[in-house]
Image (cartoon, helix red, strand yellow):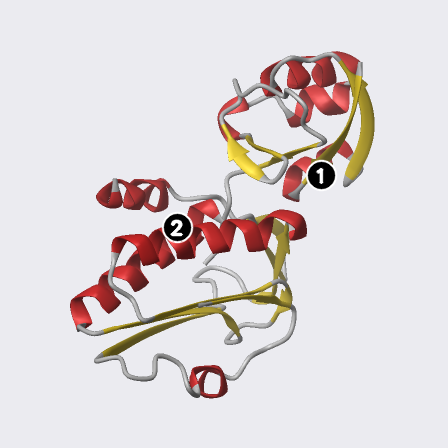
């Protein structure tokens, strides 16, 4: 098991109810971590119900959901970005 | 080459003082908080991911510099609460010739829209809502592929 900081932004943060948390996980990929989260509680299942609307960053780099977690220390989940 | 992420307003003229000296062309773009067509906008609130924002902006800026011949390049983006009409962000590019400056500025804008970790929320007289990303913004990246 490794320890990982998980961050949430925008409506994901609002639906899950916390901006960040520290977890122990064996999840090999970002998608596996999402599956672990959604199995935990309803609020995660609701927040992650539409994976097409979820973007992720591993150690501050934007990645696809099938990306490995490897030795990541921080994973962030958020909706599509709306800058500019 | 400058990347600035800040909460407060900025003075475009002051920021451009000394920018791109010796260039043949400077292009600047400033984005403002616009009114909504159907409701009264009270505030636009921009959330960001502080640890990632500067990395993402520096990556976007570096891609622009490797693709066009730029002598200078600047990205400034605000976060926090803003009123209608306030400045949100600006980009500036300087190059020997205008084509590089124009194209690089358009590239920076397209990438800032959907590849920089900012999220806009509109606070109106009827409530609040997160701004949806637009498929046109995602499609706009294709022209740079």
Numbered badge on residue A82: none
Tell which of B36 and A7 is nearer to you: A7
The residue that label 1 is drawn on is A13
Q: Position of residue A29 (x, y in %)?
A: 60, 16
State how many labels appear: 2
The residue that label 2 is drawn on is B111
Q: Position of residue A74 (x, y in %)?
A: 70, 33
Q: Give the alpha-carbon distance from disc 1 to disc 2, as whole Å.
A: 24 Å
For the C terminus of chain B, the image quarter is top left
Asked whether, in this view, residue B110 is left or right of residue B86, the answer is left
* Residue beneath the point at 25% across and 59% down: B68
Residue B10's place in the image compared with A11, above or below, is below
* Residue beneath the point at 72% across and 37% down: A7
* Residue beneath the point at 35% across and 41% down: B138
Badge 1 density bin: few <14, some 14–19, many ≥20, Cα 10 Å:
some
Q: Is residue B60 visible?
A: yes
Asked whether, in this view, residue A31 is left or right of residue A44, the answer is left
Tell which of B104 and B39 is nearer to you: B104
Judged by depth in the image, the label closer to the viewer, 1 or 2, is: 2
Q: Secondary structure at mark 1?
A: helix
């Amino acid at each position: 098991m490794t320890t990982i900081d998980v961050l949430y932004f925008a409506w994901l943060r609002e639906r899950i109810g916390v901006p960040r948390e520290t977890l122990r996980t064996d999840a090999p990929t970002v998608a596996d971590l999402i599956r672990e989260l959604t199995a935990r509680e309803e609020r995660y299942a609701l927040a992650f119900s539409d994976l097409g609307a979820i973007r992720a960053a591993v150690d501050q780099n934007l990645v696809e959901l099938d990306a490995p977690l490897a030795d990541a220390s921080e994973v962030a989940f958020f909706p599509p970005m709306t800058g500019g | 080459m400058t990347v600035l992420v800040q909460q407060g307003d900025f003075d475009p003229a002051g920021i451009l003082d000394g920018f791109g000296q010796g260039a043949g062309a400077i292009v600047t773009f400033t984005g403002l908080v616009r009114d909504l067509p159907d409701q009264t906008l009270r505030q636009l609130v921009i959330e960001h991911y502080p640890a990632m924002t500067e990395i993402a902006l520096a990556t976007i800026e570096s891609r622009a510099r490797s693709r066009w011949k730029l002598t200078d390049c600047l990205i400034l983006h605000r976060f926090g609460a803003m009123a209608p009409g306030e400045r949100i962000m600006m980009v500036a590019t300087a190059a020997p010739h205008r084509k590089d400056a124009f194209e690089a500025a358009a590239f920076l804008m397209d990438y800032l829209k959907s590849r920089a970790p900012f999220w806009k929320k509109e606070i109106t007289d009827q409530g609040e809502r997160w701004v949806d990303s637009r498929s046109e913004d995602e499609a706009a990246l294709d022209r740079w592929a």
